[in-house]
Image: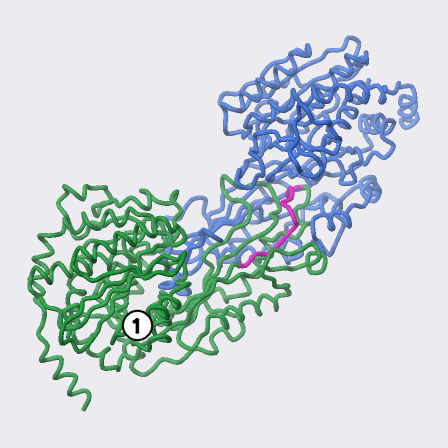
Chain colours: A blue, B green
Amino acid sequence: MRRILWLTAGLLQAQVDIAGINTWRQTHEREILREYIPLLEIPNRAPDLANIRRNAGYVLAMLTRRGVASQLLEIDGVPPVVYGEIPTPGAKRTLIFYAHYDGQPVDPKEWTSPPWKAVLRNPQGQEVSADTAQLDPEMRVYARSASDDKAPIMALMASLDAMKSLGIAHKANIKFFFEGEEEAGSLHLEQFVQKYKHLLAGDVWLICDGPVHQNRAPSLYFGVRGVTTLDVTVYGPKRELHSGHYGNWAPNPAMMLSRLLATMTDGEGKVLVAGFYDDTTPMTAAERKALLAVPGVDEALKEELGLVNTDGNNARLVERLMLPSLNIRGLESAGTGANARNVVPAKAVASLDLRLVKGNDHRRQAEKVKAHIRQQGYYVIAQDPTDEERRKYSKIAKVTSREGYNAVRTSMDLPIAREVIQTLKRTYPDLVLVPGLGGSVPLWVFEKELRTPLIGVPIVNHDNNQHSANENLRLANLWQGIVTLTTLLAMP
Amino acid sequence: MRRILWLTAGLLQAQVDIAGINTWRQTHEREILREYIPLLEIPNRAPDLANIRRNAGYVLAMLTRRGVASQLLEIDGVPPVVYGEIPTPGAKRTLIFYAHYDGQPVDPKEWTSPPWKAVLRNPQGQEVSADTAQLDPEMRVYARSASDDKAPIMALMASLDAMKSLGIAHKANIKFFFEGEEEAGSLHLEQFVQKYKHLLAGDVWLICDGPVHQNRAPSLYFGVRGVTTLDVTVYGPKRELHSGHYGNWAPNPAMMLSRLLATMTDGEGKVLVAGFYDDTTPMTAAERKALLAVPGVDEALKEELGLVNTDGNNARLVERLMLPSLNIRGLESAGTGANARNVVPAKAVASLDLRLVKGNDHRRQAEKVKAHIRQQGYYVIAQDPTDEERRKYSKIAKVTSREGYNAVRTSMDLPIAREVIQTLKRTYPDLVLVPGLGGSVPLWVFEKELRTPLIGVPIVNHDNNQHSANENLRLANLWQGIVTLTTLLAMP
């Protein structure tokens, strides 16, 4: 019964004018880039509050210039949320579009051009002028957050312009919620949602973050993983020692850390930490079915990334993402290469990130890793050891964890989920449905505080170097994103 | 018979006037520091040829100002050797004093004061003025190479001044050989010795490098370890990947490297690389005896360094130094701490240093480690992998080794060795005799090319942070070094 009603609603709904949107976009490409580039050139690390506020101001102006009733949602000393509303008289539904304007840290020496200078490059990698070059959809804009996650903000604004120009009316109430500390762990998102709950009622959160499927087809995702991070420091001698005079007498913390990390997986990506997979919620039948239907990209990806084998005995990527993970995201001890010195290092540090799926709890997962470190004979503390502790314990690990958050998964069988799927399938018959995205977005807050379903609407290219040096946005993805988001903005 | 002759020679030799030297030094302390500080303030990394030549010029001027016939020994594009001679009519012996004026790399952000600004600090760590403060032997001068190895150059110059002032005559011919690329591996030392062989005839090389024993007593050493270094890079995906979207699917090179390094030792400093200890020459009876007589410092050192246990089941430090070692001197993969990003790194690097004892060959030792890496399933190459190699091998390690050099050990039973021991024992009854120093100095070249015995004459404090940040020289060691070196400069 419900299924029939839903199909009928789908058939009755008018399709938006895709060709019209594309034509409009073609004549406005340069204008879009001219608005986008200055946004990309404002440094956007969440802890850099002065610049973060400049970003927020720019995004706010983008909204107000389009007549959207907008404001900054504020908590003292925290990157503000940029919030906007388009009320639609007679609307039966409210759609909330989420994106974030802050970005990951950068290591400028690894970048070809400075991270906060937006540079347009042709497919051959040559820099071209955004003002004068003939634009090609295979060109890319390079800058921190070009993809993650300023791109959807720009695409939404261009969609509003296209709708106005083409006379496409809103049928639902629209809200925008642009966060400013997602890459710093969304530490205050819960507080924002609690404080501004009165503004945030809605029928669905459309989470505009993350990349489309690796086959470049438009995608929707129905879950994201949670995440927590751990920094593990192990200690050798109190100060670096000359490796000739003390090597293989003084315990080497880089070797201790290597041996400790080596116990954490089987070398094939299977985590050996006790109970690591125990509380994972099994997939539903619908999720299994969707997973099987996701186009295979593993072989192409392996070729692109120069990999012969992948973890878990070459299990499919989409399957691996339905499990919690333990990843070494960084290692450091003394110096290497030109900075190498002949020393026994005083300490060695590993940064780990744990991704969580439905059923896992971020604090519990971090505790499992700490228990594992204890099992390896380490005395685990949260700060550098005192002299007293050094006298007592030969193996000491400082383990600090940043507050993390849990995964969420929206049922693909919910009416709103089915309707969003159907709306986009009319535009894109090759739409890819992903039960769970590998990346993390702090959607659990919306689920917990607002009990509103969430659906992911990614638009950027998968090969965008997200979180790394030379992050970029493929113009074709920005152009397609405008079509995708216009389609959703025009939903009833 | 030989023993009786040697004792007789010892008794006949006049002792130098220790009290006189100390009195002279007390009235010249500030003057010595005023000459030393500008030398410490010239950056002295061997690859920085412009500054290296400024160092060489300064040292040359120190010699010529004292009437020593001096010159720069040159090989094109290489830090010069500063060479000087004091011929003594009727001398039966030539003593050659070795030191080096170049220093280890620096990481300025780890230093309390800039590495090439000489700062004097009192025992409480407060900066004091070298021009006006009341000097205290427990004060220290902080700068790169304050100890390693500009200190002996300054002490030798002060010794020459003291001898002149006190009327202590040279009895032997004296030569000075101050190298400029020791910390860069003495890559051209062999060439220098071959090119300038005609200048370098002598009866003994007195190697003024390395620290005195940890009990602060004056020391001699009769061997040094050789060294070679290996940089090991293992590869994950061609580019850093988002750890949410690809973690525990894409092989993690930081985990691969940790697992590889973990196979190299037993976690207690015993190296598990096949054949690692096989070609080590056993100690002689005299060396074993000397080793047992070396004052124990392990417990005090452990307390100072915050260590409960040391490698090899708490075996004595001096014993550990008679074995070859494998030390991780640095680890790096992506970023940690504030620079951590949620990525699967593209590669991970470990810098290793291998110390060698008598019998080991540096190329052979490096080959053993490479063979071990191959045994762990790695395809070992000397440059980054090509796409073709990536397609073929799932585990690839780039292993690059800097040219190293072998260990040397001088017999403590040689007549010249006995005479040097006896000469210093008259000044210092508590003289420590170390069969083998842990550190490396490229003495093998002198042994191989000149067949001249070598004896180590260290003067600096063991706790000088050699090779690390905040390198320093304890003034008491500089003052004692002047006595030590005057004693030897006055030897027959």
**Where does residue B121 sit, x and y in percent of width and height?**
23, 45
Q: How many labels does the image show?
A: 1
Residue A266: in magenta span: no
Pick out the residue farthest to the top: A89
Image: magenta residue range: B232-244
Q: Position of residue A269 (x, y in %)?
A: 66, 53
Q: Which residue corresponds to the image point at 42% horizontal and 55% vertical from the top-left?
A: A341
The residue where tag 1 is placed is: B198
Location of residue B443 by image quarter: bottom left
Instruction: Judge from the rendering whether residue A451 lies leftward or rightward of residue A339; answer left or right.
Output: right
At horizontal 77% and vertical 43% (from top left) the residue drawn is: A283
Tell me: residue B147, above or below residue B414. Answer: above
- Residue sitting at 72 percent across and 30 percent down? A475
User: Where does residue A159 sit, x and y in percent of width and height?
Assistant: 75, 19
Image side of residue A176 versus residue B410, left or right: right
Q: Where residue B188 sits in the image (x, y, percent)? A: 40, 64
The one nearer the camera, A411 or A120, is A120
Q: Is residue B235 magenta?
A: yes
Q: Mark 1 lies on which chain?
A: B
Tag 1, which secondary structure?
Answer: helix
Q: Is residue B199 visible?
A: yes
Near-viewer residue (B136 or B81): B81
Quarter in which the C terminus of chain B is drawn = bottom left
- Looking at the rendered structure, the kind of residue marked 1 is His
Q: In this view, does B295 lie above or below B278?
A: above
Badge 1 crowding class, 10 Å Cα cut-off, few under 14, some 14 to 19, many 20 or more, is: few
Q: Quadrant of the N terminus of chain B?
A: bottom left
